[in-house]
Image (cartoon, rainbow, N blue to C red):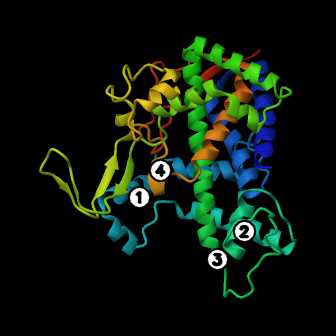
Amino acid sequence: MMFSTMTACTEGLAGLLKENERLNGVVDIKDVLSRFTTDVIGSVGFGIDCNSINDPDCDFIVYGRKVFDSHAIGRRIRQTVAVLLPMSLLKAINFKLTDASVEAFFLNVVRNTMRYREDNNINRRDFMQLMLQLKNRGTIGEDDKVLEGKDENRDGSWLTENQIAAQCFVFFFAGFETSATTMTFALYELAVNQDIQEKLRREITEVLGRHGHQITYEAIMEMTYLDKIVHETLRKHPPIADIPRICTKDYHIPGTNAVIKKGTRVDIPVQGIHRDPDYYPDPEKFDPERFSDENKSKRHQYAFLPFGEGPRVCIGARFALLQAKVGLTAIISKFRVILNKKTQTPLEYETQFFVTAPKGGLWLNVQEI
């Protein structure tokens, strides 16, 4: 159900790109892909038809941009406070990085959706339904009969509305921005490297031909070169430049006298690791073959950290990867992406965003094949 909903959203994406080509062919692909991922996450995550492909100022887009807009003075102040103050103090003062209006929006969406479904006995196979299962019975079953499976012996819910809203927000974060920027940077690299783009198009055409020319889950799983391209994009342009973690016990750094004390905040430089020539020779080169099985086996397992690792790994990572692959398949199967005079080369990052994003958007020519 989730996958079919995701692929259904590609029809609007293709329609928008076709209309844009009819008008001028030049498009800010970052903006288009953010609207596509908003439609996907709204439908898959919340059961809501956002229609942001046709309405770039819908509520989900507006509040999604607020989450990531570091130009706003309030956001910049909160980010500075979050970096300077210790985690224990931030928790003590109930510090919140997210704007209050964004929090209120997501909480209201979650509350209204849950109550409507429970009042009208509606079951829908999506992320919200999984949250309802956890709320009502503390587990996820295969029958999806959430409303029939309540544990009447419990006093209250397994999950609160606020906890569910928090999980939905994380799901939105992964689906909205991470997938959009990954697809954006991938299309930039494919526009720069036309030989790689053509090789990918051949794989997509061949695989889809075996699946009735339909984008299916099984088809996406067969696209090994697409998988390499997405991973190489995440290597060169990771969504987050560094990942903060808290040291859980004293750690002596081998070969030194330095000890990282328990409770110390440690920032893991993902961007630096991903461009370390010891792990990735000629790191500025876009080379999908870095992620062949043979080459992956030669590297340290933590030399690739686009979503973090361990128990705190991003819970939306698999969804973000799948959404990016579906979007890229839909575009490359029908369109050719080409650089134009508005494309930044070399590419520059937006320094005010905490998520890696191209400065000033990313303008490409998109031509229907």
Per the model, the C-alpha gap separating discs 4 and 1 is 10 Å
In the image, what residue type sits under mark 2?
Leu
Q: Which residue: 14% across, 46% down? A: 256
User: Mark 3 or mark 4, which has the lower sequence index?
Assistant: 4
Determine which residue is flagged by label 4. Answer: 72
Which residue is nearer to you in this view: 95 or 196?
Answer: 196
Q: Is residue 288 left or right of residue 77?
A: right
Determine which of the numbered discs, if any, sits on residue 158 in the image.
3
Residue at the image point whose x is 70% and y is 65% from the top? 140
Helix, strand or loop at mark 1: helix
Looking at the image, is mark 3 or mark 4 nearer the viewer? 3
Closer to the chain start, of discs 4 and 1, is: 4
The residue beneath circle 2 is: 132
Q: Is residue 182 visible?
A: yes
Whole-angstrom CA distance, mark 2 to mark 4, is 34 Å
User: Label 3's element?
Assistant: loop
Q: Earlier in the sequence, mark 1 or mark 2?
A: 1
Residue 333 visible within the image: no
Q: Which residue is labeled 1 in the image?
A: 78
Query: What is the crowding at mark 3: few (fewer than 14 residues within 10 Å), some, or many (at least 20)?
Result: some
Q: In the rendered view, would you say 18 is above or below 221?
A: above
Check disc 1 and give the amino acid type: Arg
Residue 78, position as x, y percentages in the image:
41, 58
* Secondary structure under the numbered disc 4 in the rendered image: loop
Density class for disc 1 (Cα within 10 Å; few <14, some 14-19, many ≥20) is some
Q: How many angstroms separate mark 2 from mark 3 (CA)?
A: 10 Å
